[in-house]
Amino acid sequence: MPVDPDGRWFESSGPIQVDGGIAVRAQRGKIGEQWWSRRFVDILERTCAPGRLARGRSYARKGQVIDFTLAPGRVAGRVQGSRPDPYQVTITIPAYDEAQWTVALSALGSQALYRAALLAGDMPHEIVELFEELDLPLFPSTLDMRCSCPDWGVPCKHVSAVLYVLAEAFDDDPFLVLAWRGRNRDEILTALRGLPEPTETVDPLAIDEEPLDGRLTDFYTPSISLSRLRERPARMTAPPELLLRVLDPPLVRVRHIPLVDILRPAYRDLADPPG
């Protein structure tokens, strides 16, 4: 078994090429386009050895990940190395139980901002703070990473490859982030639709009508502080690729890439043209 000068095992030859493997779309630069995918990648790059992640990115770009499955608390994948048998990778995090999800869904459903975004298939930035306030972190700070390869390092390049493929899968479906914690898209949307509509929030710009002659001395005094004006939530907009998320994806691939993945950047460019 070959080892490097530090006594670590390594593959003496390049990996066996995979026909139809999962190759990330980002063939250079950062992997992950959406903020939730970048949040996950940033955590990886803060906590894992850069060299091992770099080798994993190379594997992910070559399509060495054969497949992966995501279930509550667990991601399992197969990665082809230089040996004939693929390596088995598992990545686990704590999945939240029924009681914890009941609390989380109630909090999500009580906020019109979060409710509208999720029902539209989007992931609002503020959802991270909501889960943290409930002491239920949405993104894991630590991962239990295992691989059947003989490399002692954590993460090995096989685990790293699956992590990057997972990050790009988050791009396509933000509900996978929630599914990893224990609730999939259908369960979340069904629960949100079954909750009562959020109560109407008080408009901070609203004032009670009073006769003019009763306000002559303070007519030009603002009724609220300027700081409270900043508390108004940003206007919600539908994501440009909403139609692609709602419709069933066509069973068409171009060079092993799903047609939906090719169309998605075009939809985003139409919504935000250059210049």
Image: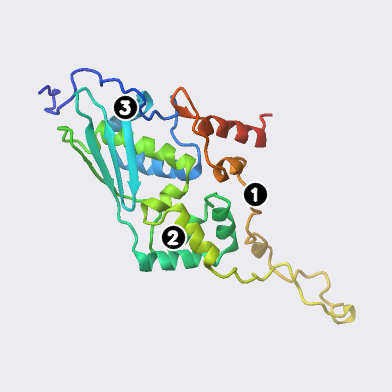
Q: Nearer the viewer, mark 3 or mark 1?
A: 3
Which element is circle 1 on? loop
Q: Residue furthest top?
A: 13
| Residue corresponding to mark 2 | 131
- Three-letter amino acid code at the position of disc 1: Thr
Q: Is residue 133 left or right of residue 160?
A: right
User: Where does the C terminus fall, quadrant-wise?
Assistant: top right
Looking at the image, which is closer to me, 1 or 97?
97
Q: Give the crowd class for mark 1: few <14, some 14-19, many >=20 residues within 10 Å.
A: few
Between residue 96 and residue 207, name the one nearer to us: 96
Q: Is residue 235 left or right of residue 166?
A: right
Residue assigned mark 1: 237
Instruction: Kindly identify the residue that appears in the image at 30 percent across and 35 percent down.
Output: 160
Question: Type of residue at label 2?
Answer: Phe
Query: Within the image, what quadrant is residue 199 found in?
Result: bottom right
Residue at the far front in the pictured view? 251
77 on left or right of 41: left
Check the image and report above or below for 94 versus 83. below
Q: Position of residue 132 (x, y in %)?
A: 42, 60
**Where is the N terminus found, in terms of image quarters?**
top left
Disc 2, SS = helix
Which callout, 1 or 2, points to the residue nearer the camera? Answer: 1
Q: Are marks 1 and 2 in contact (CB under 8 Å)?
A: no
Mark 2 or mark 1, which is nearer the start of the sequence? 2
Label whose residue precedes the other's in the sequence (3 or 1): 3
